[in-house]
Amino acid sequence: MNQSIETITLAGGCFWCLEAVYEQVRGVTQVESGYGNGLAEKPTYEQVCTGRTGHAEVVRVSFDSARLSLRQVLEIFFVIHDPTTLNRQGDDKGTQYRSGIYFHDAEQERVAREVLNEANQHHQGKVVTEITPQANYWRAEDEHQHYFANHPGQGYCAFVVSPKVEKFRRTFKSLALAPT
């Protein structure tokens, strides 16, 4: 296995938004939508949407750390979602939409805390992003994988996901893949 492939798990509202952005980032090798840091075993989308499983909608982002640093992955994260709203992103409300960085090792935790402190300074101390170890991860159903790529004209994708992708492309031009 390639020693420079690293994986981090992120929650920042609807997983379709995060997935759509990270699939456009140079150096990202895989993005998988799922459910993390909750209590239920094998939760379904419908169960997670109730807010009763404790899971957040998350993406697992695998990237080549020789081409893209964890710091860059997290800088993108803090730009493409609002880390100052507790359990909410736009009209999506509930604990399943919380902001979180779920680290896989001690070095990831260190970098995450460093970048979060910088984001918190930028947002005048209002960042509510949790940083905890990744736990109880479950892959989301197939229909939630590559959702934006498969449904770009769907209402939520057109009005919520697409602007986040465009914001990423404007803000991080050097990290964006060429449009296909």
Image (spheres, rainbow, N blue to C red):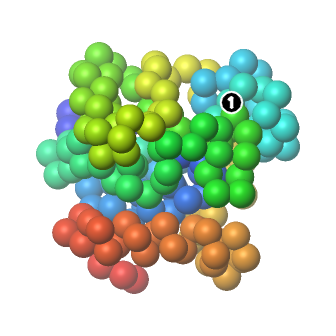
Residue 79, compared with residue 59, is above or below; it is: below
User: Quadrant of residue 44 in the image?
Assistant: top right
User: Quadrant of residue 23 in the image?
Assistant: bottom left
User: Depth check: 179 or 57 in front?
Assistant: 57
Q: Is residue 60 left or right of residue 158?
A: left
For image coordinates 32% across by 74% down, the residue present is 170
Q: Quadrant of the C terminus?
A: bottom left
Q: Kindly tell me whether residue 58 is visible in this rendering.
A: no
Q: Quadrant of the N terminus?
A: top left
Label 1: element kind: loop
For image coordinates 36% across by 81% down, the residue present is 179
Amino acid at pointer 1 = His
Residue 133 rendering spot, x and y as whole percentages: 46, 19
Residue at the left extreme, as displayed:
66
Question: On the image, numbered disc 1 is attached to which residue?
Answer: 55
For image coordinates 50% across by 51% down, the residue present is 82
User: Quadrant of residue 51 in the image?
Assistant: top right
Q: Residues within 10 Å of mark 1 (few under 14, many from 20)?
A: many
Residue 121, compared with residue 42, is above or below; it is: below
Residue 159 rendering spot, x and y as whole percentages: 64, 75
Residue 89 rendering spot, x and y as whole percentages: 62, 51
Q: Is residue 46 left or right of residue 121?
A: right
Residue at the front extreme, as displayed:
124
User: Depth check: 122 or 141 in front?
Assistant: 122
For image coordinates 15% across by 45% down, the residue present is 66
